[in-house]
Amino acid sequence: MPVLEVFLTAELFLFKSFREYSTFLNKKALKTLLNLPKIDSFRTMHQANASFFKHPELIQLFDRYATYNGSDPYKAPATLNIIQHVEYGIGGFTLKGGIYSLSRAMTDVALKLGVEILTNHPVDEIVLACNNVHGVCCRGKVIDDPNRVIGVRCGEKVIEADIVVSNSDVTNTYKKLLNDSQVAPARKYYKTEPSSSALVFYWGVQGEYPQLKMHNVIFSDDYKKEFTEIFDKGEVPDDPTIYIYISSKYNPTDAVENGENWFVMINMPPGKEETALDIQSIKEKIIEKVNKTLDIDLNKKIIFERVLTPQMIEEKTSSVFGSLYGISSNNRFAAFLRQDNRSKEYNGLYFCGGSAHSGGEIPLVILSGKIVSDLISKYEV
Ligand SMILES: Cc1cc2nc3c(=O)[nH]c(=O)nc-3n(C[C@H](O)[C@H](O)[C@H](O)COP(=O)(O)OP(=O)(O)OC[C@H]3O[C@@H](n4cnc5c(N)ncnc54)[C@H](O)[C@@H]3O)c2cc1C
């Protein structure tokens, strides 16, 4: 994948808001628009990979990158093949102390800047001037715009604010926090296809397994069937691809001595209720496949277990349907369907996070925060 392509797409699709004229009216954007055929959006990732590689397993390996944003390689545009380039061509990085150290570092910066952080304050409502029971006044200022946000309500407590940035799922923000599922972007967003969810087993495993590395994937035999089951039939895949991440390979103190910490994940259809899942039989299927592939007997080696289901993901994060990455990229227009970072309907309301532009995954979520901060500087300061 030529490097030019990465920069063409990143500049236009990831770093800026789509709804700002300035995003398109500049030399770099013009260059991208003139080079649109190069971003390969008219064929699917699978079609492109099948043209690049001959061996079916290589094609399957590269098709897997569609799942990095919860999509189906047989439907998602080949533009997303830039993900492989970023991973192999530029390289992956890991954080000392794991991904949590990123939130710690951002918290430290925020505190140094004088930000007051309130945790354990679930927001029940984004308060608008028109429905403020305390009168149309915010922080001593009279507000004459009924659609202006003036703060948030947590239980009985109203916290006044000139600007509200919602990092909660877009559908959840409209439906529950604004009580407005009929507003145009909410209706549009609700009709889009969600990205995939996941079922995760966190296992403490006795012994060490040199045949495994930090990242491991045990593929299904029929990849097309697996994605049809997930996205078209809404079923748990019969023969799931299994991802095993073992951080103790890199950082031994993450696990007990003579043990490993396995994060075992399979892709799941979004929206599967826990009652519709036979977790025990899925677990047995996974163990059987791991045993067969590695020639081991895992059954008596699992000394610790936690499970994360799609329903739990929704409950913990508010991500509707337990989707990992907001909407899927299963059509070439998906990038344009995501919620804009600045609300047109509610003044002073901004969106960031996995379901807003520029999409799910930690790097993009952080970029969405950067886009919002740029927009706030432009419109509110
Ligand atoms: C099992 C799993 C594996 C993943 N693997 C990867 C990976 O390898 N690489 C990668 O880049 N991404 C991965 N992701 C995706 C990544 O975690 C998400 O895209 C990202 O966390 C989304 O960020 P966010 O800030 O939008 O949402 P979240 O990280 O879910 O944060 C939203 C926060 O807002 C809080 N919240 C929601 N509503 C309210 C409310 N009303 N009041 C107060 N607080 C509220 C939630 O409690 C939550 O803490 C994975 C996700 C899962 C579940």
Image (cartoon, rainbow, N blue to C red):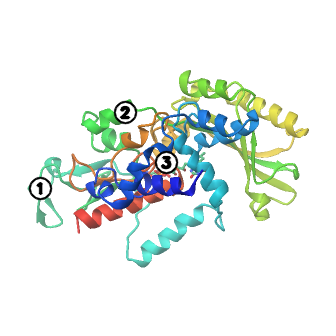
Callout 1 amino acid: Val
Number of residue marks: 3
Which mark is first along the chain, 3 or 2? Answer: 2
- Furthest residue in direction front, as rendered: 34
Q: Where in the figure is residue 296, as x and y percent of width and height?
A: 90, 40
Do we see residue 280 in this rendering? yes
Disc 2 designates what residue?
A: 190
**Of marks 3 and 1, which one's residue comes earlier in the chain?**
1
- Identify the residue shown where x is 51% and y is 31%: 271
Residue behind mark 3: 360
Q: Is residue 246 above or below residue 284?
A: below
| Circle 3: residue type | Gly
| Residue at the image position 37 percent from the left and 76 percent from the top | 114
Q: Quadrant of residue 11?
A: bottom left
- Corner quadrant of residue 190: top left
- Distance from label 1 to label 2 (Cα)? 31 Å
Q: Secondary structure at mark 2?
A: helix
Which dot marks residue 253? none
Q: Which residue is mark 1?
A: 136
Number of residues whose C-alpha sits closer than 10 Å to that of mark 2, classed few (under 14), some (14–19) or many (20 or more): some
